Amino acid sequence: MPAESPLQAPPPRVRSDDPASFAASVLRDRHPAVVARVLADFPFPAPVRDGLARLLQDPTVTPLPRDAHDHEDWDRWGEPYFGQSMFDVPFLWAENYFYRRLLYATGYHEPGPWQGIDPFGPQKAADLPGEEELRALQETGDALLVLPEDEQASALVAAALWGNRADLGFRLAQRHTTESGTEKGTETAEQLVADDTAQLWKHLAGGTVCVVADNAGRELLPDLVLIDFLLRTGRAGRVELHVKPAPYFVSDALTADVLTELRRFPADSAIGRRLWAALRAGTLELVTDPFYCAPLEFPQMPAGLAARFGAATLTILKGDLNYRRLVGDRSWSPETSFSSTTGYFPGPVAALRTVKSDVVVGLAAGVEAKLPVSWRTSGSFAMVQVRG
C-alpha cells in the first residue's frame, strides 16, 4: 500500500527514549544549555533559580501548579503523561512542556516583578540586525526594484527560507559550520531538497496571505521584506503575520519583536515606512492565538484560527516547529506525500523550512540516499513545499 494512503495507520510519534536519537539530545543537551543561558542573562532571585534547577533535575511530567493561569488546559493535555519521564512521552509535547515550565519558573505570566519579562529577550536582542546590516538591506531592496518581479520574488523567498538558520535555540547546541567545515551562508540548489516555489507563486495573486512566523532577529527581517514585496506588488491584498503570544522555543517571534525590528529600520527606509503604514492601515495585521504556545498540532487548531486559514488565499508556515505541527511529529517515510499529511488543512498551505529535526515528508524517490547521514539535523538543507 502506498505510504500516502489514507487507509494506512500513521507511523508512531517521535519520542526521546532512544539515548542516541536527536530528540533525546534536545532534552538532554539543548534544554540545560537554554536554562544556563537564561540564568546567565538575568539576576533572578533564589526561588526562580531553584525552580529552573528543579526543571532540569527531575524530568517527570507533573501538573502545572494551581496558580498557573492555564493549568486546566495543561491538566487536560498532560493527563495521559503525568508520572512519566519527558523522555518517554511524545517529543513535541515534551518540548512544549519544558518551555511552559520554564515560563512558570521565571514568573512570566504570574503577578510579580518578573511578569512579562521575556527570559530570552537578551538572546534575541543580540541577534538583531545592526544599522549597517539594515542599511545594506535597504540598498539591496532598492537594487531588486530594477529586476523583473519574478526574479525579485525568487530572491526574497530564498532569503526568507534560509533566514531560518538564525534560530537561537539551534545555535546553542550546534556549530556554525556544515558537516564539511565550510561556513554556513552559501546555499546551493542541492541543499534545497524539495522545491515547490513555482507552485507557491501561483497562489499569490491577491487576497489575504497568512504568514505564520518562526524566529525573531535575523530571520524575521527577510520575512518582513517578503511581506512588503507581497503588498507592494499586489501579490497579497493584505497580510496576517501570526506570532507567538508568549516567549517560546528561545527565539520565536512575539509582537514586541516585530515592533522592535520595525523601529530599527533607518528613518529613510522605504521598506520600514511602508510596513509601518501597512500596520496602521490594516493591510498588515499582527495576529496571535494561545494555540501557538500549546503542545498541539495543527489538526487540533481552534475554530477561529482554522477560519482564518480557510479564508486565506495561502498560508505560509515558517520554520521547523510549524512544519512538525503541520505534517505531524511522526516517524514518516520521507517519501510520504506532503499533500496526504496536510490534506486536513483548511486552505492552501506552504511550508518554508530549514530542516533541523527528523520529521520529513514529500521527498522524491532516491533523494535521501544521496544526502549526508545527519542531513535532517545539520541545518544545512531546506524545503519549500506547497499543497494547493
Image (tube, rainbow, N blue to C red):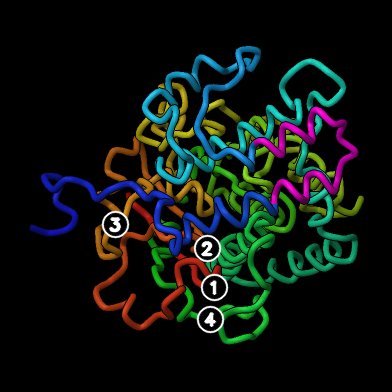
Q: Nearer the viewer, residue 169 or 310?
A: 169
Q: Residue 300: say if magenta.
A: no
Q: Nearer the viewer, mark 2 or mark 4?
A: 2
Residue 386: quadrant of the picture:
bottom left
Q: Are marks 1 and 4 in contact (CB under 8 Å)?
A: no
Q: Amino acid at mark 4?
A: Thr
Residue 38: quadrant of the picture:
top right
* Label 4 sits on residue: 188
Distance Cα–Cα, label 1 vs label 2: 7 Å
| Circle nearer the N terminus (3, 2) | 3
Distance Cα–Cα, label 1 vs label 3: 20 Å
Q: Are marks 3 and 2 in contact (CB under 8 Å)?
A: no
Quarter of the N terminus within the rendering: bottom left
Q: Nearer the viewer, residue 284 or 382?
A: 382
Q: At which x and y percent is residue 326? A: 40, 45
Distance Cα–Cα, label 1 vs label 4: 10 Å
Q: Residue 53: say if magenta.
A: yes
* Label 2 sits on residue: 354
Q: What is the secondary structure assignment of the residue under circle 4?
A: loop
Q: Amino acid at mark 1?
A: Ser
| Circle nearer the N terminus (1, 2) | 2
Say which mark, if any, is on residue 332: 3
The residue at 24%/74% (across/down) is: 365
Distance Cα–Cα, label 3 vs label 4: 26 Å
Q: Nearer the viewer, mark 3 or mark 2?
A: 3
Q: Nearer the viewer, residue 201 or 93?
A: 93
| Circle nearer the N terminus (1, 3) | 3
Say which mark, if any, is on residue 380: 1
Q: Nearer the viewer, mark 3 or mark 4?
A: 3
Q: Which residues are magenta?
A: 34-54
Q: Residue furthest left?
A: 1
